[in-house]
């Protein structure tokens, strides 16, 4: 059986014709097309007119000043509680390093001052927790509740539109 390169032979459907310069195995069913332009390509396309928008009744919640107030109140709350606990612990460490005479002095019943200050860390930590809860109840929670109520009203107004 001899092979004649000029004779037509059946081709598999996925094989390209030998003379097709646009063939790509990744674009089998897509015919090659050139882009068509409604006008010359260097001219800008006409922009559609934007739909007129109604002005919001009030500023959206994300830009509301209550959020800034809430963030600053929460920041103040964290700082007070953290500085209470860390400040006492830092004081204890500084006294231990630089005032060993004070820390070894007997205070009451033969207990050294350093031991009493170390035992006082637990109540100071409880005080920091109590301050955190108090400032949350007094400063942060009322602001968060007001923002939550306003967001619910905004959601109802948005659903009514």
Image: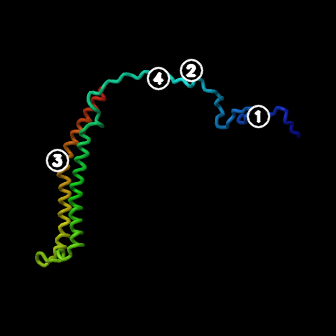
In this view, the residue in front, 46 or 28, is: 46
In this view, the residue in front, 161 or 43, is: 43
Instruction: Give the label on residue 138, or none.
Output: 3
Residues under labels 4 and 1: Cα distance? 45 Å
- Label 2 crowd (10 A; few <14 / some 14-19 / many >=20): few
> Is 161 left, or right, of 36 in this rendering?
left
Q: How is the image coloured?
A: rainbow
Q: Are marks 4 and 1 in contact (CB under 8 Å)?
A: no
Which comes sooner in the sequence, label 4 or label 2?
2
- Label 4 crowd (10 A; few <14 / some 14-19 / many >=20): few
Residue labelled with disc 2: 39
Measured from the top left, where is residue 110 in percent x and y? 13, 79
Which comes sooner in the sequence, label 1 or label 2?
1
Relative vertical location of residue 127 with respect to residue 53 in this rendering, above or below: below
- The residue that appears at 39% across and 22% down in the rendered structure is 51
Quarter placement of the C terminus: top left
Residue labelled with disc 1: 18
Measured from the top left, where is residue 52 in percent x and y? 36, 22
Residues under labels 4 and 3: Cα distance? 54 Å
């Amino acid at each position: 059986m001899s092979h004649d390169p000029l004779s037509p032979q059946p081709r598999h459907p996925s094989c390209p014709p030998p003379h097709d310069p646009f063939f790509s195995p990744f674009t089998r069913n897509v015919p090659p097309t050139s882009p068509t332009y409604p006008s010359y390509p260097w001219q800008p396309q006409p922009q559609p007119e934007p739909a007129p928008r109604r002005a919001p009744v009030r500023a959206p919640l994300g830009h509301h000043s209550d959020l800034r107030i809430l963030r600053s109140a929460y920041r103040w709350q964290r700082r007070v509680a953290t500085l209470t606990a860390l400040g006492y612990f830092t004081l204890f460490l500084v006294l231990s390093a630089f005032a060993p005479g004070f820390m070894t002095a007997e205070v009451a019943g033969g207990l050294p001052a350093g031991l009493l200050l170390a035992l006082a860390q637990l109540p100071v930590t409880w005080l920091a927790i109590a301050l955190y809860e108090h400032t949350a109840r007094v400063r942060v929670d009322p602001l968060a509740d007001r923002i939550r109520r306003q967001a619910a009203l905004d959601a109802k107004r948005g659903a009514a539109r």
